[in-house]
Image (cartoon, rainbow, N blue to C red):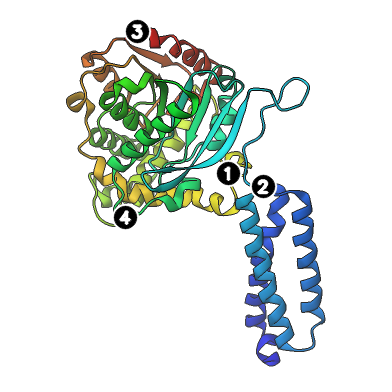
């Protein structure tokens, strides 16, 4: 056994395995909310185990030390999940603000355990439910950072939808449907109404979240004061065909033959079966990079800053990406027939559409067409001149101003 462990190739992979096993503990103080005393206890355990491994005279002792190192790494992941939190809202004196709410918690929606954050300086303020993009996207940390000013005026609620981030395990990917998201959003709405004693709440959706928000506002208008659609999705297949053709043109103009050939080989949407996420991501991500290089757009994304936030444990940080890909693979093909110009032409809820002037992922001309035909107590198309597909991130101060106006829309019914 000792001879086997001494083999150079086996030794290399053994050390690689050890380093990977040590990594969860090393990451705890850097990117999780685990208290320092837990980190120190686990780190000292690893130090002792590595000393045992290096001094051990027998292969059995060395293997035993490695097994325990793995167990310590698993404990680190468990603690990172258990200690995940959203920061307390503090007053000018640095103490927790009386009457505020700052919670990261599980709610059961239609029998599935899902995560939400609730944040507001005054728990008596109107409730604003934020519906993240994706499907499969998580914005628990991003909304806290980007829209913190709204916490003065609303109780801002963010929801990790089934398959997204902390709610990754809430999804049965074999049976996941858009209707499940709608039904879960309805249950969450009822929970929030009861929790905060409010007859109606406000909704704000971005990208895929605008589709979900439109369904909710249309089907259950009695539950909502207003709906704000940011980077709205109007006609799913038409949008993706537009994006595919634009990606062909951009790659051709740039002389990017590799991307051009790959797009031509896969052909235009719609896609079904395996590989949907890979095919759609090929032109969507390509256009996102193209769009974000536009000097007229304010910089927006801090992906790693969001992933490393205390709301996510180590397992959640991995699922941050897994959720996007896996949910996209399952749900994307079920959306090709969505076209709100035909399916939802009238709302009983006041609505405002926030559109980035330079958006290419969700073509603005489709939003203009939709606003023209939509009937609603109040409808408004608001252009963000320095934005692409993420106006709520790219023009944050203006986004807050618009949402403060949304609180007045409840009077228009």
Give the CA separation, mark 4 to mark 2: 32 Å
Task: Nearest to the eye among marks 4 and 2: give it.
Answer: 2
Q: Assign a secondary structure to mark 1.
A: helix
Label 1 sits on residue: 307
Quarter occupied by residue 285:
top left
Which of the numbered marks, if any, corresponds to residue 407?
A: none
Q: CA distance from mark 2 to mark 1?
A: 8 Å
Q: Quadrant of residue 348?
A: top left
x%, y% of residue 73?
A: 66, 64
At a point 40% along the width and 37% down the height, the residue shown is 287
Question: What is the x, y in percent for residue 61?
Answer: 74, 84
Q: What distance separates the C-alpha of mark 2 from that of mark 3?
A: 45 Å
Q: Which of disc 3 and disc 1 is earlier in sequence? A: 1
What is the secondary structure assignment of the residue under circle 4?
loop
* Pointer 4 local density, CA inside 10 Å: few below 14, some 14–19, many at least 20: few
> Could you say whether the residue bearing mark 3 is in a helix, strand or loop?
loop
Check contact, mark 2 vs mark 1: CB within 8 A: yes
Q: Nearer the viewer, residue 250 or 80?
A: 80
Residue at the location (43% across, 34% down)? 132
Rendered residue at 63%/71% (across/down): 17
Label 1: how many Cα within 10 Å (few below 14, some 14–19, many 20+): many
Mark 2 lies on residue = 31
Q: CA distance from mark 1 to mark 3?
A: 39 Å
Q: Which residue is mark 3?
A: 412
Q: Which residue is mark 4?
A: 275
| Gap in angstroms between the C-alphas marked 1 and 4 | 25 Å
Q: Is residue 177 left or right of residue 37?
A: left
The reply to whether the C-beta atoms of the residues labelled 4 and 2 are less than 8 Å apart is no
Within 10 Å of disc 2 (Cα), the crowding (few <14, some 14-19, many 20+) is: many
First in residue order: circle 2 vs circle 3 = 2
């Amino acid at each position: 056994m000792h001879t086997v462990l001494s083999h150079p190739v086996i030794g290399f992979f053994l050390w690689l395995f050890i380093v990977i096993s040590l990594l969860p503990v090393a990451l705890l103080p850097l990117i999780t909310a685990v208290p320092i005393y837990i980190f120190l206890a686990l780190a000292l355990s690893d130090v002792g185990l590595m000393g045992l491994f290096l001094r051990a005279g027998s292969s059995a002792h060395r293997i035993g030390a490695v097994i325990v190192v793995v167990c310590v790494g698993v404990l680190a992941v468990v603690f990172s999940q258990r200690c995940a939190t959203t920061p307390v809202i503090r007053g000018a004196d640095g103490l927790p603000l009386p009457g505020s709410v700052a919670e990261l918690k599980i709610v059961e929606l239609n029998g599935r355990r899902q995560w939400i954050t609730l944040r507001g300086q005054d728990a008596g303020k109107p409730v604003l439910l934020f519906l993240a993009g994706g499907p499969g996207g998580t914005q628990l940390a991003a909304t806290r950072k980007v829209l913190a000013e709204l916490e003065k005026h609303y109780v801002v609620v963010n929801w990790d939808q089934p398959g997204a981030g902390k709610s990754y395990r809430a999804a049965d990917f074999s049976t996941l449907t858009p209707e499940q998201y709608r039904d879960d959003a309805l249950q969450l709405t009822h929970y929030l109404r009861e929790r905060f004693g409010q007859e109606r709440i406000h909704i704000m959706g971005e990208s895929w979240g605008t589709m979900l928000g439109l369904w909710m506002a249309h089907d259950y208008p009695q539950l909502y004061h207003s709906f704000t659609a940011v980077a709205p999705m109007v006609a799913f297949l038409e949008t993706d065909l537009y994006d595919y053709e634009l990606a062909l043109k951009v790659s051709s103009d740039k002389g990017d033959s590799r991307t051009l050939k790959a797009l031509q080989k896969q052909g235009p949407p719609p896609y079904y079966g395996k590989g949907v996420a890979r095919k759609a991501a090929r032109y969507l991500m390509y256009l996102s990079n193209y769009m974000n290089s536009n000097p007229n757009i304010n910089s927006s994304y801090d992906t790693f800053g969001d992933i490393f936030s205390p709301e996510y444990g180590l397992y959640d940080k991995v699922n941050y990406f897994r959720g996007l890909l896996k949910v996209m693979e399952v749900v994307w093909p079920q959306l090709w027939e969505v076209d709100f110009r035909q399916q939802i032409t009238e709302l009983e809820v006041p609505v405002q559409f926030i559109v980035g002037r330079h958006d290419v992922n969700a073509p603005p001309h489709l939003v203009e067409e939709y606003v023209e035909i939509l009937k609603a107590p109040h409808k408004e198309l608001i252009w963000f001149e320095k934005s692409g597909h993420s106006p709520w991130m790219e023009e944050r101060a203006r986004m807050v101003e618009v949402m403060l106006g949304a609180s007045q829309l409840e009077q228009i019914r």
